[in-house]
Amino acid sequence: MHAHNIPVALALHGGCGVMAEHEMSTREWQEARDALQAALTAGWRILQHQGSALDAVQAAVVVLEDSIYFNAGYGAALNADGEHELDASIMDGTTLAAGAVCAARHIRNPILAARYLLEGGDAVLLTGAGADAYAQQQRLACVENQYFTTPRRIEALSKMREHQAAGTFKTARESEKHGTVGAVALDSLGHLAAATSTGGYTNKPVGRIGDSPIIGAGTYARDGVCAVSGTGQGELFIRHVFAHDIAARILYGNETLEHAAQHLIMGTFHEQGIGAGAVAIDGQGNVSAPFNTLGMFRGWVNADGTGVVASHQQEFPFVLPSLV
Ligand code: GLY
């Protein structure tokens, strides 16, 4: 069934800043899981039809960007000016080609602009007005900045401003601060790809760029090694060159994917009280999805082809559509 007998694999996350279970209704949790399921299904369909890992991670991230429940695209976090500045990146593990946008204000699906940049093979990272203009040139859907705003994000901004006034930012819960979406995939030709998209964190300074659009920090893919997408406080991910650190541990240190992916999240970050999570896949199709917070929106496909989505500890299996 699979070319060269390579198992295809797919995993995604919707951020490690999930709320406590009582803070959303049963219906809302269900809708968030449905969106994770739809994202997994979109990516899986592509992989099942011998499509590329790049197309699969892009398709999964577009679904998550369009969902109100995740901090990327529609429903993204508001910055200190009450506006949205969006970051995204995508990387091809075969060629190490990459594309990224940061502080974009008008691109409805920032991951699509990142993909165009990857294919263009020229600039890797465009910022702000340049990124928005590029998306327009490529005829990608562009929107007013308010398109991304939701009542939940307005409330989160006002709470975060209260924290700031009271000097209690550090005590704010991860769910009040962060959120990101991302996907990693291994395709039937053995190629790896990773994609990440985010609105950053609530009340972030205008112009602040996180790890998500920084290749090696929030996103990394290299065939035969791993594909990684991170979620958490971006500054730490940049300083530790998080995603590349995982690849280096595997490539130079011969660590297993699980060991490498857990290292910073369950070690240094956890010890420093830094909420963090990631999804990662290696060249054999092993999947790792560590997090050190209350929960992480996540999903993956098991070796037997069953899908799984989760927000907290409990995992929800589901049946993926079969071929054709
Ligand atoms: N990890 C997302 C951010 O810090 O912007």
Image (spheres, rainbow, N blue to C red):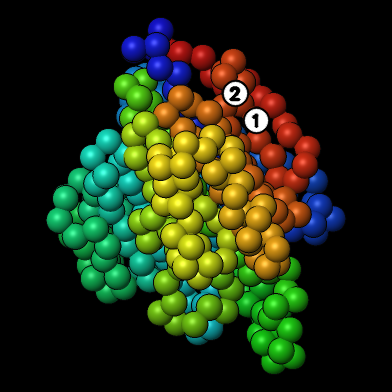
Give whichever of 147, 239 is nearer the camera: 239
- Relative placement, left or right, of 79 versus 46 is right
Query: Closer to the observer: label 2 or label 1?
Result: 2
Q: Percent from the top left, x then y, of residue 75?
A: 55, 61
First in sequence: mark 2 or mark 1?
2
Q: Percent from the top left, x then y, of residue 240?
A: 48, 63
Number of marks in the rendered image:
2
Please say if 210 is above or below 116: below
Inspect the image, locate mark 1, and give the three-letter code of the amino acid beneath it.
Val
Q: Which residue is mark 2?
A: 302
Q: Residue at x 59, y 50 (%)?
A: 263
Q: Which residue is mark 1?
A: 308
Work out whether residue 143 can be spotted: no
Is disc 1 placed on a helix, strand or loop?
A: strand
Residue 24 figure quarter: bottom right
Inspect the image, locate mark 2, and give the three-letter code of the amino acid beneath it.
Asn
Is disc 2 placed on a helix, strand or loop?
A: loop
Q: Residue at x 78, y 37 (%)?
A: 314
Residues marked 2 and 1 touching at CB (< 8 Å) = yes
Q: Tell which residue pokes out farthest to the bottom in this image.
A: 165
